[in-house]
Amino acid sequence: MALPPALSSSLSLPVVASPLFICSGPELVIAQCQAGIVGSFPALNARSTELLSAWLDRIAEETAGFAPFAVNQIVHRSNARLEADMEVIVAHKVPIVITSLGARPEVNEAVHSYGGIVLHDVITNEFARKAIEKGADGLIAVAAGAGGHAGTQSPFALVQEIREWFDGPLLLSGAIAHGRSVLAAQAAGADLAYVGSAFLSTTEANTDDAYKQMIVDSTAKDIVYSNLFTGIHGNYLRGSIEAAGLDPDALPESDPSAMNFGSGGNSKAKAWKDIWGSGQGIGSIKQSLSVADLVAQLKVQYDDAVDQLVGKTA
Ligand SMILES: Cc1cc2nc3c(=O)[nH]c(=O)nc-3n(C[C@H](O)[C@H](O)[C@H](O)COP(=O)(O)O)c2cc1C
């Protein structure tokens, strides 16, 4: 199936930058779109629905003529702003809406009412089927090693199972921080790569300087998978868990019913603010760059990987 124009038009690289709680705001999104990839942010990063509306005005103005942008909605009962934020999204005709932590037909219908598309993120093939049944247009397969609320399945297994029945837009995420991995996502069967952690250390990200430095200094061995902080399993930086006075190798299990995306779950240390999320791919991030330079670097790596592959198969 052909990709909808919002995902195929004028991208410099087949990449959607993923929403990052706290860390992605208008500066990051605008820089991502201007660099030729889809930029995104969680609606909840704007402190109020009114501020969300102001952010969308600014983003629409400054990204006109560049790659499209996306807004992420947390479709979970802990998100008291869902309906009010949806009204703002509809009024602004946001081109792409990314839904996570729940699929709701009325959210999909609202986005379709003005011609927008919905991408829903899933960690299993079963959730993928449900999301499409409820009206999502495309899927984001969140595989093992992803930052934030990650899955545990191999990207090869997850993409292959979904591709057996779904030929619509499919994005792959999890530890993609190098142009070679973007090409690998496409080879595995995805249309585009969904990249998060690689942007945490960029100049435009709303990330603490110490967090940026920890991304630059850390590698896959520094990523800890735990459900303690939000009630759902996710990947976090070992150094931030230690700084909060906890032993990353002996974290207790959380009670899933205490799940609250933006709160401390079962721990005093607050997820995202004190406990810093990151995927396993950050070994490829050697310095803090501007978004334009990072995307340019990914593009060179991607083109080199294409050349190497053609050389191998010729
Ligand atoms: C610090 C951080 C915050 C995140 N916040 C959100 C969020 O608010 N909404 C969401 O859908 N995903 C969120 N994610 C997950 C990303 O959207 C994406 O699935 C993930 O970053 C992809 O894996 P990667 O980080 O290895 O590239 C977050 C990830 C990180 C690292």
Image (cartoon, rainbow, N blue to C red):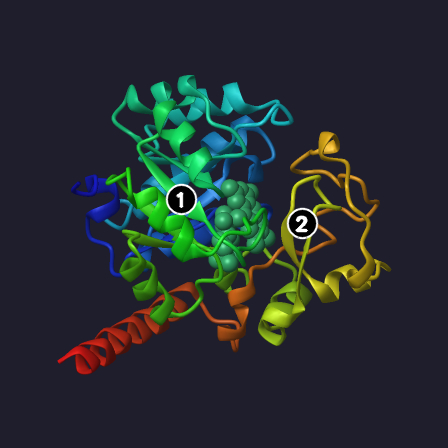
Taking the spot 80% from the left edge, 54% from the top edge, the residue there is 251
Q: Which mark is residue 272?
A: 2
> Regarding mark 1 in the picture, which secondary structure is present there?
strand
Give residue 145's quadrant in the image: bottom right
> Regarding mark 2 in the picture, which secondary structure is present there?
loop
Q: Is residue 249 left or right of residue 167?
A: right
2 and 1 marks in contact (CB < 8 Å): no
Label 1 beta carbon less than 8 Å to ligand 1:
yes
Taking the spot 26% from the left edge, 50% from the top edge, the residue there is 66
**Is residue 177 depicted above or below 118 in this figure?**
below
Label 2 beta carbon less than 8 Å to ligand 1:
yes
Disc 2: CA contacts within 10 A as few (<14), some (14-19) or many (>=20): many
Closer to the chain start, of discs 2 and 1, is 1
Q: Which mark is residue 140?
A: 1
The single residue placed furthest to the left in the displayed view is 314
* Amino acid type, callout 1: Ile
Q: Nearer the viewer, residue 265 or 31?
A: 265
Q: Is residue 148 left or right of residue 259?
A: left
- How many discs appear? 2
Q: Nearer the viewer, residue 195 or 181?
A: 181
Q: Is residue 288 left or right of residue 237?
A: left
Q: From where the camera sits, is residue 126 visible? A: yes
Mark 2 → mark 1, Cα distance in angstroms: 21 Å
Give residue 267's quadrant in the image: top right
Q: Residue 181, how many percent across, how many down?
A: 37, 67
Q: Nearer the viewer, residue 194 or 159?
A: 159
Q: Residue 18, how many percent across, how many down?
A: 45, 49
Q: Which mark is in front, 2 or 1?
A: 1
